[in-house]
Image: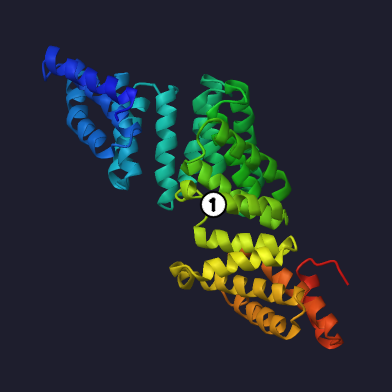
């Protein structure tokens, strides 16, 4: 069923066909507006086809400084960029910006937004410094002409924060994202959907700085807002859940890990879980083991092993799973089995491709092996594993 916006757009399209000449500038303008509606409703091919046909007609019908002409060119360049036609996009962005410069229109919101779009292409094509310099200049203009809480100003601040990816720039990036987030709260109010987008930029920068305790409340608020706004099955919600799992694991908040992992296994969240069902079961088993629920963990592992996808798990996931089985065997008092499984898991994880989501696992293995050799009254090996555990921030004895 066609949504109301598309119905209105299609109706206006028919009105143009009936009452306006094909060569009329109003027809071209209407088609360009329809292209935007197509794009926003998941019809990129139709949108681009309309703009490619009607933008040249607009250029011929109006002065090149006309706001509608410039906006249509910018929209077409934006669409090109988003479908991978980067060279065409950059060429069109630059020609559009040249007209903003020529007619002293660079302080207009559309012009500043065009700069932001061009910068994205520059950053993605290894011309980051050129893009950042351009973005800094645009932010100065935006703050002066539009104000610190204008939508375009906030977007440019957010973009700069996202593009400052060098470790030496991490604190500046965090401050920029915080400024944009605080500005969005002031402009829109805390319950507006746009605020979630700016909050997630702050979260991303906090995660880069490994400030897990600070990021969790923000991510939990974004998750809650996604549910409240009926946007729980979107790419943004999926990214929030993925980040939450990581943050919960890093801070050993295993009840939170269990909650997200179980949600990821619900059929309705298959495409928006933030983690694959197979990896969700590995993470769920880990959360259950850490909560001293070995029987529940065993059920999850047994169920996972029955699925066809089990053999397709990455070496890292399989090694983590083996370590969990070793911890379960240790809890059950089967020390020989535990020794074999834990030692094998440690060896595999030391050579496997690193995955941040499992970065705390080696420490858990070292702790388990320390306690295991203590039970076996093997002081030499106990001390060896205790030193390894301490090197991984373990504070026990």
- Relative vertical location of residue 258 with respect to residue 234 in this rendering, above or below: below
Q: Quadrant of residue 225?
A: top right
Question: Would you say 397 lies left or right of 239 here?
Answer: right
Q: Quadrant of the N terminus?
A: top left
Residue 110 position, x and y percent, is 40, 25
**Residue 164 in view in this figure:** no
Residue ranking furthest to the top: 19
Residue at screen point 33% across, 27% down: 3
Q: Name the residue carrying label 1.
A: 264
Q: Quadrant of the C terminus?
A: bottom right
Q: Residues within 10 Å of mark 1 (few under 14, many from 20)?
A: many
- Relative vertical location of residue 165 with respect to residue 350 in this rendering, above or below: above
Residue 280 position, x and y percent, is 56, 58
Nearer to me, 310 or 93: 310
Residue at screen point 62% across, 43% down: 203
Q: Quadrant of residue 9?
A: top left
Residue 247 position, x and y percent, is 66, 52
Residue at screen point 68% across, 82% down: 343
Nearer to me, 340 or 174: 340
Q: What colour scheme governs how the chains and residues are painted in the rendered image of this protein?
A: rainbow
């Amino acid at each position: 069923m066609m949504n109301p916006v598309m119905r209105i757009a299609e109706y206006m399209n028919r009105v143009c066909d009936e009452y306006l000449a094909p060569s009329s500038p109003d027809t071209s303008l209407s088609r360009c507006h329809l292209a935007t509606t197509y794009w926003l409703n998941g019809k990129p091919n139709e949108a681009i086809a309309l703009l490619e046909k009607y933008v040249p007609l607009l250029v011929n019908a109006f002065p090149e400084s006309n706001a509608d002409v410039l906006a249509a060119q910018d929209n077409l360049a934006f669409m090109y960029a988003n479908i991978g036609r980067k060279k065409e996009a950059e060429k069109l962005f630059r020609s559009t910006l040249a007209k903003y410069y020529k007619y002293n229109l660079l302080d207009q919101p559309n012009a500043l937004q065009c700069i932001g779009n061009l910068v994205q292409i520059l950053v993605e094509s290894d011309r980051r410094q050129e893009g950042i310099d351009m973005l800094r200049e645009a932010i100065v203009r935006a703050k002066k002409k539009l104000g610190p809480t204008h939508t375009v100003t906030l977007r440019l601040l957010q973009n700069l924060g996202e593009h400052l990816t060098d470790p030496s720039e991490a604190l500046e990036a965090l401050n920029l994202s915080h400024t944009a987030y605080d500005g969005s709260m002031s402009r829109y109010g805390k319950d507006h959907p746009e605020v979630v987008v700016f909050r997630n930029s702050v979260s991303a920068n906090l995660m880069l700085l490994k400030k897990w305790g600070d990021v969790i409340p923000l991510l939990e608020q974004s998750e809650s807002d996604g549910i409240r706004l009926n946007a729980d099955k979107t790419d943004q919600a999926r990214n929030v859940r993925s980040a939450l799992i990581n943050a919960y694991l890093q801070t050993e908040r295993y009840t939170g890990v269990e909650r997200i992992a179980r949600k990821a296994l619900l059929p309705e969240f298959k495409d928006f879980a933030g983690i694959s069902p197979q990896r969700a079961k590995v993470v769920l088993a880990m959360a259950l083991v850490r909560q001293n629920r070995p029987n529940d963990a065993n059920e999850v592992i047994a169920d996972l092993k029955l699925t066809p996808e089990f053999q397709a798990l990455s070496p890292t996931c399989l090694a983590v799973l083996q370590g969990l089985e070793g911890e379960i065997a240790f809890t059950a008092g089967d020390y020989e089995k535990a020794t074999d499984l834990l030692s094998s898991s440690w060896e595999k994880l030391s050579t496997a491709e690193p995955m941040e989501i499992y970065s705390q696992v080696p420490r858990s293995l070292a702790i388990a092996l320390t306690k295991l050799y203590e039970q076996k009254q093997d002081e030499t090996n106990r001390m060896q594993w205790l030193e390894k555990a301490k090197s991984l921030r373990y504070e026990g004895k």
